[in-house]
Amino acid sequence: MILEDRRPLDAARVEHTEAALLAFHRCDLAHGGGRGRRRLAARLAREVLPALHRPGPAAVRLRMYRVAGRLAYLCGFMHFDDGRPGRARRYYTTALRLADLGGAPADRAVVLRGMSVQALALGDGRQALALARAATGCAAPAERRSFLLGQLAVALARDGARHDALRALGAAERFLDRATGPADAPVGVFHQAALLRQQAAVRDLLGDRAGAVAALRCSLPHRPPEEARSHAVVLGDLAVLLERTGRLTEAAAVWHDFLDLRPALASARVDAAFTAMRARLRPHGRQPAVRDLLERAADG
């Protein structure tokens, strides 16, 4: 029988949980959601969420609600990245509730944005747009406004609203220029590389494939080196765009860069890109660059 821990919640416990949030965030960036999602889910269930029922000073409890909500959001995103959207949705729902209890509207906005990203990935453009609009309706500092507006621009472009998409994208650029520093939590961090990726998505959805390729190429040197999973996802997106424009030799070179990163990653999104790569390029297997790539891919 497990006895409920009723010891008062103190600042040390909150700081310990905040350190765990940072560690799981770094693991996700470097290795993908599949590496740590089970451990994070277990920690939430066994340690973090039960701690919310412990007594303690109001300020300490408020901090605990906020860090618990951010961990729930991160757990949702890690499940999304590892191809488990149903579980991701459940963690996102928990994160919304905790953001409300913690009085953190900016955190609520980040969760709604994450839900919009998942809806778009699942092909539900209408839901993605509704969630992105709801996210931008939450109070948030400049660093977060750019993060939110970039997703709104992508959802609007997916809906065919060209003028509104470009307007939202321009607003995202202006807010990023006005940002005075990183977000106050490791989740919801936005930077130039991320904005360029969203620019690429908007341009591709609006039919400007050359502009999309240029934006993705520009994003690569801006991507922090610790973000290996996102780097691989962007490389996959860039290679597909190059394939679609008939630039198979260039695409093959980008896919090789992708394969360099893949062994260290545990991400269903990366695995899906790898599987799609082999299927897409197989009809072009007689071309030397493609043949060499497919031979390498066959080994792993």
Image: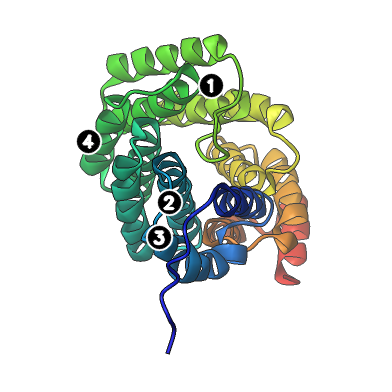
The kind of residue tagged 4 is Ala
Which marked residue is nearer to the observer: mark 4 or mark 2? 2
Residue 46 horizontal side relative to residue 132, left or right: right
Where's residue 23, x and y in %? 66, 52
Tag 1 and tag 4, C-beta contact below 8 Å:
no
Tag 2 and tag 3, C-beta contact below 8 Å:
yes
Nearer to me, 204 or 129 = 129
To which quarter of the image does residue 13 belong? bottom right
Tag 4 and tag 2, C-beta contact below 8 Å:
no
Residue 183 horizontal side relative to residue 105, left or right: right
- Give me the disc on residue 130: 4
Residue 134 horizontal side relative to residue 248, left or right: left
The kind of residue tagged 1 is Gly
What SS does tag 2 mark? loop
The residue carrying mark 2 is 56
What SS does tag 3 mark? loop
- Give me the disc on residue 211: 1
Tell me the quadrant of the picture where the C terminus can be found.
bottom right
What SS does tag 4 mark? helix
CA gap, disc 1 and disc 4: 27 Å
CA gap, disc 4 and disc 2: 38 Å
Which marked residue is nearer to the observer: mark 1 or mark 4? 4
Where's residue 221, x and y in %? 74, 28
Which marked residue is nearer to the observer: mark 4 or mark 3? 3
CA gap, disc 2 and disc 3: 7 Å
The kind of residue tagged 3 is Arg
- Give me the disc on residue 54: 3
Which tag, 2 or 1, sits closer to the chain's start? 2
Which tag, 4 or 3, sits closer to the chain's start? 3
Count of labels in the image: 4
> Is any atom of residue 224 visible in this view?
yes
Where's residue 89, x and y in %? 32, 57
